[in-house]
């Protein structure tokens, strides 16, 4: 390979490595950009599952998105390091005698990169040049770090899903009690502590979506634990509390819950491309429809009243 080709290959390789590392850091330790590679892959996976027949395929979207993103990181790092090694093939490496006629320089570089990234270390191809003897262990460390980060990310997702499902189940129970003719029903208004608890838990769920956007794409087939299916009922609870004129505590806490719902709806619109410019109720219906648990949100509804969170109640 001539000097210009070697420089170009190394530059492209370094760019791929840097892109993968930046995406990993943004996904795990900050708020990933809307147009980052991982967000684009997750959105594409969700869209593909939506177009498959049956709603059960949506249950695969979250786990499949996780696998696709982790695989993309591995591919970016493996191919990036392969392009860095390519200009040094074969002179910069020691090959086992049985491999002298095997493959091409690019194929050998990719093979060595993947073996090193996965920390397998077969030893049939070894770096001979001083710089390569430093680069190879560095790639192994990145591979080990990628494995650790992926496992940590996966373990962080489960508590988020548990909090969301617990909130959904509590709202579902309130809805069932109200609809049960054999039950006297809950007091009206509810105790202020109930509104306060619902508000704090909804805020936690909204923050979870900011920190772990991938959790949006985990679909719950059991309607009892599906938050998108009960958010509109939570809005009804908050609006009834806000209309209370005899209980200042219920009126106050209902207002806080309404603001939390507005912020939740606004965040969903901004981060997950749901219809913008609609009322909060319409956004919540679109949220339910996106998870195949409710009707589509009416299009073109305008903001009427509420708080400055980007969407409004209606």
Image: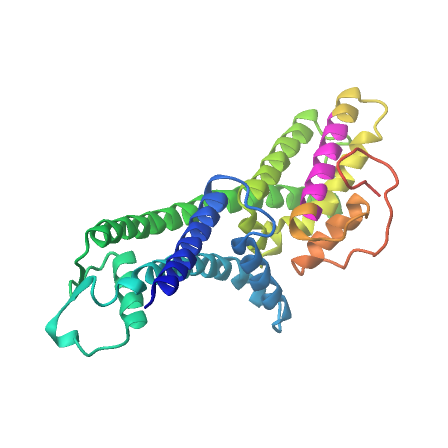
Colour convention of the picture: rainbow
Name which residue lies at 46% across and 47% down: 22
Q: Nearer the viewer, residue 16 or 70?
A: 16
Q: Quadrant of residue 52?
A: bottom right
Q: Nearer the viewer, residue 255 or 115?
A: 115
Report the side of 264 relative to 24 (left or right). Answer: right
Percent of width and height locating residue 133: 20, 52
Report the side of 61 relative to 196 (left or right). Answer: left
Q: Nearer the viewer, residue 118 or 183?
A: 118
Magenta stretch, overall SS: helix
Name which residue lies at 78% across and 31% down: 241
Regarding residue 182, the answer to whether it shows in the image is no
Q: Which residues are magenta?
A: 253-269
Extreme top residue here?
248
Quarter of the rendering occupied by the C terminus? top right
Extreme front residue here?
3
């Amino acid at each position: 390979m001539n000097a210009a080709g070697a420089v170009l290959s190394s530059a492209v390789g370094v760019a791929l490595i840097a892109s993968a590392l930046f995406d990993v850091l943004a996904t795990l330790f900050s708020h990933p950009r809307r147009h980052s590679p991982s967000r684009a892959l997750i959105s594409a996976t969700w869209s593909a599952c939506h177009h498959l027949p049956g709603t059960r395929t949506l249950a695969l979207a979250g786990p499949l998105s996780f696998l696709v993103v982790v695989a993309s990181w591995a591919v970016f790092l493996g191919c990036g390091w392969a392009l860095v090694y390519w200009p040094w093939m074969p002179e910069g490496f020691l090959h086992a005698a049985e491999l002298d006629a095997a493959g091409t320089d690019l194929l050998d570089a990719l093979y060595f990169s993947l073996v090193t990234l996965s920390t397998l270390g077969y030893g049939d191809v070894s770096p001979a040049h001083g710089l390569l003897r430093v680069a190879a262990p560095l790639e192994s460390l990145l591979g080990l770090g990628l494995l650790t980060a992926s496992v940590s990310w996966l373990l962080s997702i489960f508590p988020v899903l548990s909090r969301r499902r617990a909130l959904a189940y509590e709202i579902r129970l309130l809805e069932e009690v109200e609809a049960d003719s054999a039950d006297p029903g809950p007091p009206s208004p509810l105790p202020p502590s109930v509104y306060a608890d619902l508000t704090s838990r909804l805020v936690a769920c909204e923050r979870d979506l900011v920190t772990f956007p991938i959790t949006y794409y985990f679909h719950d087939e059991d309607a009892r634990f599906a938050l998108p299916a009960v958010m509109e009922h939570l809005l009804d609870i908050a609006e009834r509390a806000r209309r209370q004129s005899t209980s200042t505590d219920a009126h106050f806490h209902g207002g806080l819950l309404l603001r939390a719902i507005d912020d939740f709806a606004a965040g969903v619109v901004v981060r997950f491309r749901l219809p913008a410019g609609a009322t909060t109720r319409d956004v919540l219906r679109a949220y339910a429809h996106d998870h195949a648990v409710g009707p589509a949100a009416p299009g073109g509804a305008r903001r009427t009243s509420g708080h400055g969170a980007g969407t409004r109640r209606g």
